[in-house]
């Protein structure tokens, strides 16, 4: 793990494992393929998974911006509930595209603008608190907010502004700085999502780059390499959920748990956000058409993935539906045991993307950026 150096745009800090995910494709050496078999799948993933996912994120962020604007105009408990419900929708929309850290999400620190996590030393959170304490008026304009640290303009910042114990006055008139800042964060999230979407859909954008894979392509020498990129994104997201969002936070025993390092613990969206991450890999397989590429004798892998993901989602949903706060779950023997169990099917699903799919397709997945050197 790297230490945080700064949260200014000139040196955005992230844990090395997460930062490495955006470092571009780790290409295998001359993977065998039938180009006609992979090209339609690459186009299908872009058109049916990536683009709709970012459209949903952009639309949900815009709706949240409007909901917070209504809260600021006429503060009330009901308006605050609506804004908080909109935030939950926003977290789920982001969870569906979180695996796709490469391409347009990598440019201009857009991924970190959306999701600055982990922040183990709380540097980013202290910056959010400083803005609130000083009532920095430049944080109430989207353009000037986006010139600030990535940590003060994304989902983690909005989680704090809307759900921290100090957020109760948001429901009471008159609307204050905190509400205007929250509205601006939602606008910044919508802007980042729009930029990423445009980066995928432009005539010369990343979607076109992946679909035009070939010997002269500067990034993908074949459509098999483009498929590898998607497989790697899925298996690394599964590893992040199992190892970083669960394992590293609950520790070996309940006494070792550090639940407040989890993203979205204030809003109660820790477990639903992980469910959305898991569903994202199923969507990649099914809507993206990866399952359709499997040979008949390997077709069982698609059902196996659905089963493994479904089992992990069942555990997470049952824990969430119990009504117990995330912190209590992580620190209780029963909750810790169930969370530990959920890591088993997640690891199984990770193996399917890391090993079985590449083998079935005749591809070599190559370097996993989460494993280090």
Image (cartoon, grey):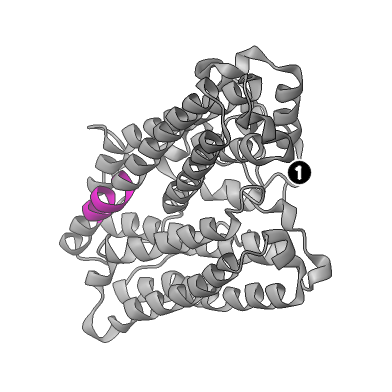
Direction left: furthest residue: 36
Residue 102 left/right relative to 258: left
Asked if the magenta segment contains residue 15, the reply would be no
Tell me the element at label 1: loop
- Residue position for label 1: 3
Residue 359 appears in the figure: yes
Residue 178 on image: x %, y %: 64, 25
Residue 206 on image: x %, y %: 32, 40
Viewer-proximal residue among 371 and 318: 318
Q: Residue at x 73, y 35 (%)?
A: 166
Residue neighbourhood size for the residue with mark 1, other residues' Cα within 10 Å, grouped as few (<14), some (14–19), many (≥20): few
Viewer-proximal residue among 76 and 71: 76
Q: Main secondary structure of the magenta part?
A: helix
Residue 31 appears in the figure: no
Q: Residue at x 57, y 28 (%)?
A: 182
Disc tally is 1
Q: Residue at x 44, y 57 (%)?
A: 233
Asked if the magenta segment contains residue 50, the reply would be yes
Q: Where does the magenta region start and end?
A: 42-51
The quadrant holding residue 141 is top right
Residue 39 left/right relative to 2: left
Q: Residue at x 28, y 49 (%)?
A: 46
């Amino acid at each position: 793990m790297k230490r945080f150096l700064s949260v200014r745009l000139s040196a955005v800090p992230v844990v090395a494992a997460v930062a490495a995910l955006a470092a571009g494709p780790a290409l295998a050496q001359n993977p065998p393929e039938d180009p006609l078999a992979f090209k339609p799948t690459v186009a299908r993933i872009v058109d049916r998974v990536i683009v709709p996912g970012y459209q949903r994120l952009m639309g949900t962020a815009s709706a949240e911006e409007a909901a917070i604007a209504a809260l600021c105009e006429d503060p009330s408990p009901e308006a605050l509930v609506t804004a908080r419900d909109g935030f939950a929708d926003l977290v789920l929309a982001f969870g569906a595209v979180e695996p796709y850290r490469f391409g347009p999400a990598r440019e201009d620190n857009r991924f970190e603008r959306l999701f600055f996590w982990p922040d183990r030393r709380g540097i980013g959170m202290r910056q959010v608190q400083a803005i609130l304490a000083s009532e920095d008026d430049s944080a109430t304009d989207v353009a000037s907010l986006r010139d600030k640290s990535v940590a003060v303009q994304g989902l983690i910042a909005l989680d704090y502004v809307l759900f921290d114990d100090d957020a109760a006055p948001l429901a009471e008139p008159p609307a204050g700085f905190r509400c205007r800042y929250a509205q601006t964060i939602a606008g910044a999230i919508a802007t980042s999502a729009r930029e990423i979407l445009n980066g995928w859909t432009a005539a010369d954008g990343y979607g076109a780059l992946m679909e035009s894979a070939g010997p002269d392509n500067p990034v993908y020498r074949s459509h098999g390499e483009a498929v590898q990129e998607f497989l790697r994104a899925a298996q690394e997201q599964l590893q992040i959920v199992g190892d970083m969002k669960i394992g590293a936070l609950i520790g070996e025993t309940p006494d070792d748990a550090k639940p407040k390092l989890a993203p979205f613990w204030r809003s109660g969206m820790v477990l639903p956000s992980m469910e959305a991450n898991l569903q994202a890999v199923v969507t990649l397989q099914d809507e993206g058409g990866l399952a359709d590429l499997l040979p008949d004798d390997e077709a069982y892998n698609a059902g196996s993935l659905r089963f493994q993901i479904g089992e992990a989602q069942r555990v997470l949903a049952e824990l969430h539906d119990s009504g117990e706060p995330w912190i209590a779950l992580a620190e209780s023997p029963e909750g810790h045991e169930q969370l530990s169990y959920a890591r088993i099917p997640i690891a199984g699903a990770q193996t399917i993307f890391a090993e079985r799919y590449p083998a079935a397709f005749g591809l070599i997945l190559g370097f996993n950026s989460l494993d280090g050197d």
